[in-house]
Image (tube, rainbow, N blue to C red):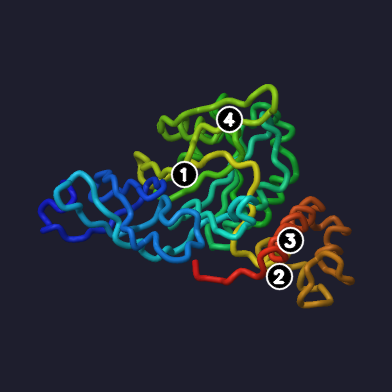
Amino acid sequence: MEPGDGDGGADREGVVINAGSGHCTVVCDGREIPCRLRGRLKQGLQTERTLVVAGDRVRIAPVPGDPAIAVVEEVLPRRNRISRTSSKRERGRREQVMMANLDQVVVVQSVRQPEPSGGLVDRLLVAAERYGVEGVLCLNKVDLDPVAAAAPAWDHYRSIGYLVLPTSVVTGEGLTAFHDRLQGRISLLLGASGTGKSSLLARATGLRLRIGEVTAKTGLGRHTTTQTELYPLADGGFIADTPGIRGFDPWDVAPIELRELFPDFTAPAQTCRYDTCLHRDEPDCGVKRAVAAGALPAWRLAAYLAILKDLQEREDVRGPQRRRSS
């Protein structure tokens, strides 16, 4: 059915599967429909780099005289989103929404080729916690270094409630569990370039995406995905593959709120002398005591402090963010 056929040209609702500057593709009634944005959606102060993103539910209307395309009349309220701060060139003043209306973020980390990105996993999980999205860790390429795959860090994530899935495209380890985790859910895959997101999806789900390789010179991956795009899965659900990232600054997190986004800090923080303790320079800090006693890994506190430093520097530059609903 073309837009407007059989419904008198009435507006309909659909889901955005990819978006660019001023245009997007919307799945509506089982069909992919090219759409452009209504001009009024682009007017006024823009605090986001992208007005429409993958996962958005939108109201579309047919274009008179051209039944093959439609126009986006309205972006419907989002139940959640995953966002990061725009580039340093923009001084972090705008929000970059990567995806909306999702069930889980699957963070893909390789044990080798490329080497694990220190702190990146924690930053991505902070973004998931901020918007109430479930976080899942996929530890990929475990065949390259079984010892690293069994490192205590991954057990720590499990102990605080995160699902950790060891996987290998080469040996097939964990592919069934990875496949089953995606079924019936709307998922966003995030990770550094070269960690094997696209090849993992191809092997586990049958999706054929562009697959890159890790360069010998830098040890980093080449970008094969150029934008966030939502793909339907044969057994139900949607998956969004994203361009590989080398850094991530969570959006809409005040420095004082960060401590609440580290689940393993909750219990030790109850013994801090000050309610406003940032677990940094304050005396009699329960979190620092937990680290000293070996009850909390030092690398988790280090990851937290690195993010806290970035959030405070960002706030110093642009002032406190004006909060908004998810």
Q: Which residue is mark 3?
A: 313
Residue that numbered label 2 is attached to: 256
At label 1, counting other C-alpha atoms closer than 10 Å, the crowd grade (few under 14, some 14-19, many 20 or more) is many
Q: Earlier in the sequence, mark 2 or mark 1?
A: 1
Q: In front: mark 3 or mark 4?
A: 3
Numbered label attached to residue 222? 4
Q: Position of residue 30 (x, y in %)?
A: 25, 46
The Cα–Cα distance between marks 2 and 1, rounded to whole angstroms, is 30 Å
Q: Position of residue 82 (x, y in %)?
A: 52, 56
Residue at (61%, 31%) from the top-left corner?
Answer: 221
How many marks the image carries: the answer is 4
Whether residues under marks 3 and 4 lie with C-beta atoms below 8 angstroms apart, the answer is no
Indicate which disc residue 228 carries. 1
Which badge, 1 or 4, comes first in the chain's sequence?
4
Return the residue nearer the eye: 197 or 66.
66
Answer left or right for 5 relative to 86: left
Task: Give the residue displayed 56% in from the left and 71% down from the top.
Answer: 323
Rate crowding at label 3 as few (under 14), some (14 to 19) or many (20 or more) other CA atoms within 10 Å. few
Residue type, label 1:
Thr
Q: Give amino acid for label 3.
A: Glu
Q: Residues within 10 Å of mark 2 (few under 14, many from 20)?
A: few
Q: Which circle's residue, 3 or 2, is located before the other in the chain? A: 2
The residue that appears at 14% across and 57% down in the rendered structure is 9
Q: Secondary structure at mark 4?
A: loop
Cα separation between marks 4 and 2: 36 Å
Q: Earlier in the sequence, mark 4 or mark 2?
A: 4
